[in-house]
Image (tube, helix red, strand yellow):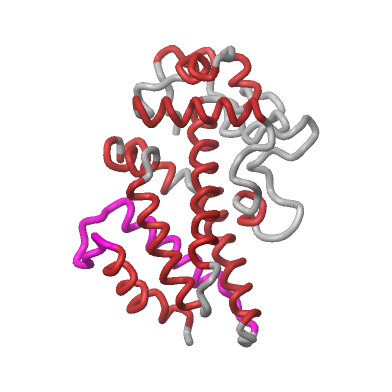
Amino acid sequence: MTVRGDDDSLLGDARLDGSPPGGSPPAGALDGSPLGAPPLGAPPLGGALGGSLLGGAPEPADALTAQILDAAREQFTTFGLRRSTVDDVARRAGVSRVTVYRRIGSKDSLVSACLLREYRRFVTDVDEAVASLPTVEDRLVEGFTVVLRHIRHHPLVGGLLRLEPETMLPYLTVESGPAFLAMRGYLVDRLDQARQAEGQPESDPTPVAELMVRITVSFLLNPVSTFELDDDDRVRDFARRYLVPLLGR
């Protein structure tokens, strides 16, 4: 999918990593990493993909990349995706269009990079919210509650889901592959850590993690449901009734 304004045509059909048609992907296209470093979306050298995409710091180490992403977040939050272009983001960031293209890429790349940074912030908040809880069951319940609350009320992600659901849909479904694998990998890592801390027998948490991600996405995309999840207490009750049993305890 390409989300592009009318004056974005000079970028051509740039790939998600920001590379021009037929060209080599620029290193650090999404995360502003130094030349020669793997771009943010590249397969990790080891470990789960979640550790590669979500395990780092929420903010880019590169100040210019962070400046561009801040401008993109403000632009997309204020005007939405359909009405925003790379030129708009460049003006807000106080840089040239070429700089945006070289540091991050096309408009699709800007959207993906913004969403990935917000996802990193989400998992940081989730980790902080569940850190003091004693059991994996408690952490699962509170983590699910925090994620739903944050995304629903988030000015960018939640706002776009309410105002431009058809535009956001691909980023949560057919074009969500890297983000989906990252979220699943993050949950696999946390569930495995909790299992080890409790001295539980070794098991593969991947199926449980995948079901949790899919359930969460389905509620975000279509909140109309027989389950009333309009406040945190009801979300926690749902998680205890239907998600905790997935752990097979």
Q: Residue at x 48, y 27 (%)?
A: 72
Q: Residue at x 38, y 63 (%)?
A: 145
Nearer to us in this view, 102 or 207: 102
* Residue 142 x/y as whole percent: 42, 68
Specify the quadrant of the image occupied by residue 184.
Answer: bottom right
Q: Is residue 219 positioned above or below 179 on the image? A: below
Q: Residue furthest right?
A: 36
Q: Is residue 98 positioned above or below 172 on the image? A: above
Q: Residue at x 48, y 18 (%)?
A: 92
| Left or right of 50 on screen, residue 9 | left
| Left or right of 150 on screen, residue 184 | right
**Magenta part of the chain:** 202-231
Specify the quadrant of the image occupied by residue 104.
Answer: top right
Tag count = 0
Q: Residue at x 30, y 36 (%)?
A: 164
Nearer to us in this view, 50 or 15: 50
* Residue 208 x/y as whole percent: 49, 72
Magenta segment includes 214: yes
Q: Is residue 194 positioned above or below 98 on the image? A: below
| Left or right of 245 on screen, residue 189 | right
* Residue 71 x/y as whole percent: 50, 25
Name the quarter where the N terminus is drawn. top left
* Residue 46 x/y as whole percent: 75, 57
